[in-house]
Image (tube, rainbow, N blue to C red):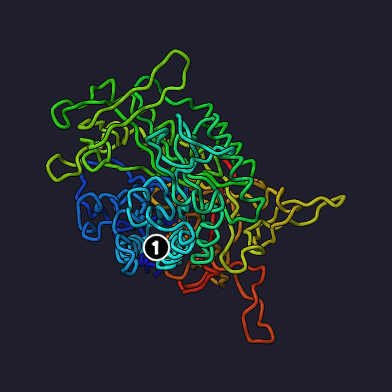
Amino acid sequence: MIPLVVCMFSSRSASFHTVCVVLLGLASGWLPDASGQEAFPGDRLRELVPPNFAIGGVMGGYDTDSLDTPVLDLARSEFNAVTAKAFMPFGPWTDPTQPIDTSGLTRNVAWAVQNGMQVHAHVLVYPTENVRLPWFQQLPNEDVEQVLQQYTSTMAGSVSGGVWVWDVVNEVLGDNGDVMDADGLRMGLGSGENFVPYKEYAAMGPDYIAKAFEWAHEADPNALLILNEYSAETVNDKSDRLLALCKRLRDQGVPIDGVGFQNHWLDLRYEPNYDSIRENFQRFANEGFQVFITECDVAAVHTQDPTGSPPSQEQLQRQARVFSNLLQIALEQPACKSFLMWDYTDQTSWLQDTDFTLTLADRRPGYSDTVVPPGTSMFATPIAGGDGVVPISPKLAYVQMQATLLNRPFDTYRVTSGWDWQTSYLARFGQPASEGQFVPSSEVYAERLDEQSESWSSLKWELERIGPSAYRIRNLWGDGADYLTRQPAVSDDPEDVLPGSTVGMQSLDETWTSQQWFFIPAGNGGFRLVNGWAPEDGVLTREAQGQNSAGDDVPGPEVRLHPPADWSSQVWYFHRIGQ
């Protein structure tokens, strides 16, 4: 639902009056902070990230009773995305004689959608966890494919249209002594006498990966589908094999959109190789794959006392540096679509008071692995507390992430409406000059994107952030009058300046609300663009140019302003192409 925004203005050049009544839909993200987190300074993270960039964290698993907690209140305040987690060993299908229980997943996704948040759903096929499900391990090999298809199709289909991106398969590449096939795919857990084969691989070979993507696409055709992996963030042997796997799948016609890089940074001996991460992300982007940071956490300390030995100031500074540098890398890379954490408060993290042994493999010559015993706490998130005992409060890492977002350069985008998006790229019109050259005019229109127009600066727009969810929109085909502006209505009285229904390009005037655009989330990564001058009828809209023989409206090149409506022509998508 588009919010109704009612404000008073004295003229086109007036600023907002102090009193402004804003009636909002649930998905607007303009609600005041309802989480009670007054200790968090400045703007919320979700208000600082670029449009169509996801920031958030995991909801806490397949727990249908956890939707009314301070931790999720914090998520609603801070984030525009969450990770909803469900896979076979943890609730959905513990008994093969019973139906698959989709209620936890559907409830979590419904909560996220209701709160205007994109959903990263984890995971459909996870061999490392499925070995913990006795009935699955005991299946005859000839039954495995049918069971995997049933699970994948049921879970993905239960939330079809509500999920932004699915981790289709998780952690399938081997390392650190794993038993692997010729392509580096892990064939099971352990080695020697302790080897436990993956049922998926034993029954289907490597084809289970491709088929999982195909089943997911059939069940949820609008979701992005990715392969999620750990320890492949830098350029190394594992990321080489990951890139080769993704290209091989794509060449087979498998509907794979990208890669999730988990980003668990738990070794205190050294920081990530940031240049190598940049290089690695770029080579996946060069191959046309979208990039997602999916499970980021950064250990600050390894302590056996979860409450009595918090990190030192030096350790917190190191943690903050890693979080902010990783976020900066994500923001620099146009192919990177998310910065998601696992978890986002210390006391709810899987790395706090652990119940498992963790081995941190060190592949540097002369260095040995580090074994982290059970009962260890790492204080690995940017936010303290989360358990109802320790107060929820921002750590230095949160403040540094906030500063990284505030200090980033303006982003450049192509902008397209949801109505026949291939022909609806927002563009600045040109007019012929001497010798066949064109110069920018004041008009805007909807243009097709093709090999020729892809290079045009008239289709490139820079977003200049001026406040929470508020931007100026500047075209890069510049002549000085470069800002998208609501034009005044034609009037016989020059003193009677009223908002019109057209938009055009004008020079910057920082006092004009007609050059302020508010981004209202519209689901699936789209936004309604609401002009600050008389916003009640100021929604940017692609116009129809008549009807076809069936009586359906046909999209035209004209762009105008209208009151809010349930039209795809009022939903705009921002494709980041750089900073």
Which residue is farthest bottom? 550
Residue 531 seen in the current view: no
Q: Identity of the amino acid at label 1?
A: Phe
Q: Nearer the viewer, residue 51 or 343?
A: 343
Residue 374 image position (x, y, % from top left): 23, 32
Residue 35 image position (x, y, % from top left): 22, 52
Q: Residue at x 34, y 66 (%)?
A: 100
> Around disc 1, counting alpha carbons within 10 Å, would you say few (fewer than 14), some (14 to 19), or many (20 or more)?
some
Q: Which residue is mark 1?
A: 9
Q: Nearer the viewer, residue 107 or 461?
A: 107
Q: Residue at x 46, y 70 (%)?
A: 537
Q: Nearer the viewer, residue 86 or 461?
A: 86
Query: Which quarter of the image is occupied by the C terminus?
Result: top right
Residue 230 image position (x, y, % from top left): 44, 38
Q: Residue at x 29, y 31 (%)?
A: 396
Query: Which quarter of the image is occupied by the N terminus?
Result: bottom left
Residue 4 seen in the current view: yes
Which residue is farthest top? 366
Q: Residue at x 64, y 68 (%)?
A: 558
Q: Quadrant of residue 577?
A: top right
